Image (tube, rainbow, N blue to C red):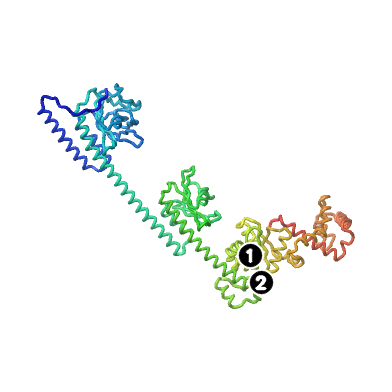
Amino acid sequence: MFHEASELRTSSPDLASYRWRRERELSSLYATARSLTALGELDSVLDSIVRAAHELIGTDFTYLSLLTPEGELTLKASEGTISPSFNQASVPAGTGVGGRVIATGAPAWVSNYLKTRDVPHDRAFDDLVVPEGMVALLGVPLLVGEEVIGVLFAADRTERPFENDEVALLSAFADHAAIALNNARLYDESRSALKQLQSAVAMMERAQSVHESLATVVLKGGGAGEIARLLVDHLHGEVTVFDRGGAVTARCSPGPASGPPPDRSRPEVVEQARRSGRWATTSDSAGQWHSAAAIQAGDTHLGALLLTRAEEPTPVDIRTLERAAQIMGLLILKETAIAEAEERVSGELLTELLVSLPPAGPAARARAHARGVDIDSLNVIVVVQSETRPASEVSRRLHAMSPEWQGLAGEHLGRATLLAAAPDAAGLAGAVHGRLSRELGSPVRVVAEPVPDGNWRAAFEIAGRCCDLMLSLGVTDSGSTTEPYAMFALLFDTDRAPDLDRFLTAALAPLLAYDQRRSTQLVATLTAYFANSANLTRTASTLHVHLNTLLKRLDRVESILGPAWRDPDRALQLQVALRLHELRGRIDRPT
């Protein structure tokens, strides 16, 4: 049967004996309460409370349960229990003796817990009661002000009632225990807050140290590699620096590589950081954590920093990575400003050489010498044009590679231009075309013209005309010298490309139509014929055909064009048209 504690009534005839026992109990209570106030840590207080209660009340065992935010009573400490599983007990809200104590804020007891039906039972808790042998149970509230924070229990393994003085004694002890428990909780909270504060201060000092180190690297002229190494020392992981195009500019590891080589492609987390404009963190199937911070200047994306390691990054690590990205952004802006200034100076010197008559003056030579350029060694001019990229971008690319040929690069009259010292103009055109095609990822026309006499103005003009002629012929992606195009560039005004198309159509359309209709090779035959100066034997050898076959083909040409095709004027037109058609046919050929 369930009982709520009533007021203490004494009916014992031996009043002196009762008073003596009460005085002893109270003395023990106060001594125990004083000892609890000397404790600080929560776990120590909990253990001391159940131990003192066990000694004070004299039951088989005692235990203490605290109220969780969800309303459950969870056992935190016990004394005298014999079942390990009982120490994991947790009682749902509103069930058992503890639920009644929580609901009423007053002590309650049962003489036989499992048999009583006066309180709701929890099957899981009842299953723990059996191996523990618990029968009689008394619960008293742990009160802090008007709030019940838990319940202190005293239990026996035999059925019996609890006397009013036992209830009063345990209740009085619980009042003192609640105060000590609350003080211990406040102490733990204060100590935890102090630790958090100390940790935050340490984090701030560490972050400040990293920031100062990063600033020192930049002020001393360090680059991406130095920043990556500094981050490795502080964050203990692999650090990769990406440029705005996603290419790796620096990578640094904390030690010698072990295990499989890392994936060199740009992880998706870098793209996530770019889209967010700040940072992103993910983990892979191998348990590696990847944290990326975007390098931004306003709304302009300049690149990213990537940290890869086995441990999950802390908020301080992320903040450090972001600080490094900010410093990296300043470094990139500084390098960009320096590069733009160098490009401007280089472009001004380039323009001066292209607009002045040879030879170059002393001032221009001095400026070139200051940049490590010997004007007298510059013997090739390169003009570059792209239909998909602006001349300023192409000029920057040329400027970056100009030191390889001890040259100057810049933009002149809307064309990206390079003055270089190279032994082979054709080789230079091919090398520049290959580099720009890879870097730009789009078609580009590169024309090189040897300049043996220092007349840069004339060389620039003919190279530019050849570049325009290539476009008129449909050549959009090629690297060449001016030699195949120079004569025709002088003959045709590249601003009148439709006239060039009409000329080619009038000269070659009948032959091209016949070749297409009959699958013959009259255009190729006539090209070889003029290339071999109308020598029939050499032409047949070039075409790998019999002489009679060649004669039949030439007769067919005459039947299509008429006998006048051999006249000098008509033959010259045909030769020019065939040569231009051959150049146009190079569009799909490798450079």
Quarter of the image where one finds residue 29: top left
Can residue 240 be seen here? The reply is no
Residue 307 seen anywhere in this rendered image of the structure: yes
Q: Residue 240, percent across and down?
A: 49, 53
The secondary structure type at the circle numbered 2 is: helix
- Would you say 263 lies left or right of 159 here? right
Q: For the C terminus, which image quadrant?
A: bottom right
Vertical arrangement, residue 134 with respect to residue 262, above or below: above
Which quadrant holds residue 420? Answer: bottom right
Outermost residue on the bottom side: it is 362
Measuring 74% from the left and 58% from the top, which residue is drawn there?
Answer: 584
Labelled disc at residue 416:
1
- Marks 2, 1: nearer the viewer: 1
In front of the other: 60 or 74: 74
Residue 100: where, in percent of width, then height?
Answer: 29, 29
Of residues 299 and 254, the one nearer the viewer is 299
Q: CA distance from mark 2 to mark 1?
A: 14 Å
Describe the element under mark 1 as helix, strand or loop. Answer: strand
The quarter of the image holding the N terminus is top left
Q: Residue at x 59, y 78 (%)?
A: 362
The crowding category of the residue bearing disc 2, from other C-alpha atoms within 10 Å (few below 14, some 14 to 19, many at least 20), is many
Q: Residue at x 54, y 56 (%)?
A: 244
**Quarter of the rendering containing residue 389:** bottom right
Q: Residue furthest top?
A: 115
- The local crowd at label 1, few if under 14, some if 14 to 19, many if 20 or more residues have their Cα within 10 Å, is many
Please state which amino acid type lies under the numbered disc 1. Answer: Ala
Q: Disc 2 designates what residue?
A: 456
